Image (tube, rainbow, N blue to C red):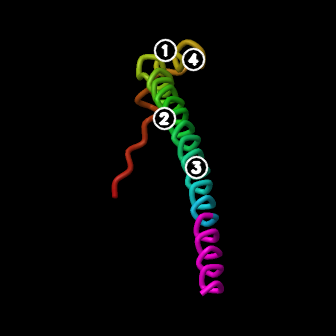
Amino acid sequence: MKALNVILVLLVVASALHVVRLVATDRHLAQQIAVTRDGIERLEGTYAELQLEEGTLTAQGRIERIAAEDLGMGPPGADRLTVVFR
């Protein structure tokens, strides 16, 4: 009977240690999830800013103005057009 009690105590202690380990693992994983969510939110904010900047940089009026003023470009003349038929 005494040996059975010792075995049961050892099993209870082992079970308790396993529960402690599982709780520690759970806390660690919860912390990693929080860090990952923060990173996702930061990246989503950066993505929104980049989309806004892209919209500003690719605005048709801005492109036409830069082409005309900075690069001296304009529509091609009739002599510079080539029509290709398939």
| Residue 39, picture quadrant | top right
* Span highlighted in magenta in the image: 1-16
Mark found first going from the N terminus, 1 or 4: 1
Q: Which residue is mark 3?
A: 27
State the image quarter where residue 25 is shown: bottom right
Query: Residue at image x 54%, y 30%?
Result: 46
Q: Main secondary structure of the magenta part?
A: helix
In the shown orientation, is residue 2 left or right of residue 81?
Answer: right
Q: Residue at coordinates 58% horizontally, 69% vertically from top-left?
A: 15
| Label 4 element class | loop
The answer to whether mark 1 and mark 3 are in CB contact below 8 A is no
Circles 3 and 2 in contact, beta carbons < 8 Å: no
Type of amino acid at the residue the image marks with label 1: Arg
In the rendered structure, find residue 72 and report the number of the disc placed on it. 4
Nearer to me, 75 or 47: 47
Badge 1 is on which residue? 65
Tell which circle, 3 or 4, labels the residue nearer the N-terminal end.
Answer: 3
Q: Amino acid at mark 3?
A: Arg
Q: Can you tell which of label 1 and label 2 is closer to the viewer?
A: 2
Q: Residue furthest left?
A: 86
Front: mark 1 or 3: 3
How far from the left and from the top, in percent, is residue 17? 64, 64
Q: Nearer the viewer, mark 3 or mark 4?
A: 3
Label 3 – label 2 distance at C-alpha: 26 Å
Badge 4 amino acid: Gly
Write the residue at 58% across / 49% down. 27
Q: In front here: 21 or 16?
A: 16
Q: Describe the element under mark 3 as helix, strand or loop.
A: helix
* Dot placed on the residue nearer the N-terminal end, 3 or 2: 3
Question: Residues under labels 1 and 3: Cα distance?
Answer: 56 Å
| Residue at image mark 2 | 44
Residue 80, above or below 74: below
